[in-house]
Amino acid sequence: MTAMKERFSENELTSLRNDLLQGGLIDFREAAELVQIFLMGRGYGVSPQAARDAVGRVEMAGCALPVLQHELENLALVM
């Protein structure tokens, strides 16, 4: 697949996706915090605004795993 497969395991991505879906993605701020925590825990930094923007795109795509993976890859590359 992509280089993201090497950075984040499918289990990690699925777990984050499930967390986002359980929260209903209703509160973008909380969902963005989850994304930030996920990335910070793996050595990446991300701005709150960039995380909110990414969460919005993931939500519009129905939280599809490939979209989540793509957005995390883009956020991780920022640093």
Image (tube, grey):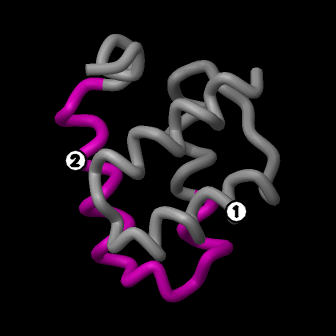
Residue 66 is covered by the magenta coloring = no
How many badges with numbers are in the image? 2
Return the mark for residue 53.
Answer: 1
The rendered magenta stretch, by its main secondary structure, is classed as helix
Residue carrying label 2 = 14
Q: Disc 1 and disc 2: Cα gap in Å?
A: 20 Å
In this image, 41 relative to 12: left or right? Answer: right
Q: Position of residue 51 (x, y in %)?
A: 68, 54
Label 1: few (<14), some (14–19) or many (≥20) C-alpha neighbours in 10 Å: some
Q: Would you place residue 19 above or below residue 4 in this image?
A: below
Which element type, helix, strand or loop, lies under badge 2?
Answer: helix
Return the mark for residue 78.
Answer: none
Report the amino acid beneath label 1. Asp
Which element type, helix, strand or loop, lies under badge 1?
Answer: helix
Residue at image coords 62%, 28%: 76
Residue range in magenta is 9-33
Residue 20 is covered by the magenta coloring = yes
Q: List the single residue furthest toward the left.
A: 11
Q: Position of residue 40 (x, y in %)?
A: 62, 32
Q: Quadrant of the N terminus?
A: top left
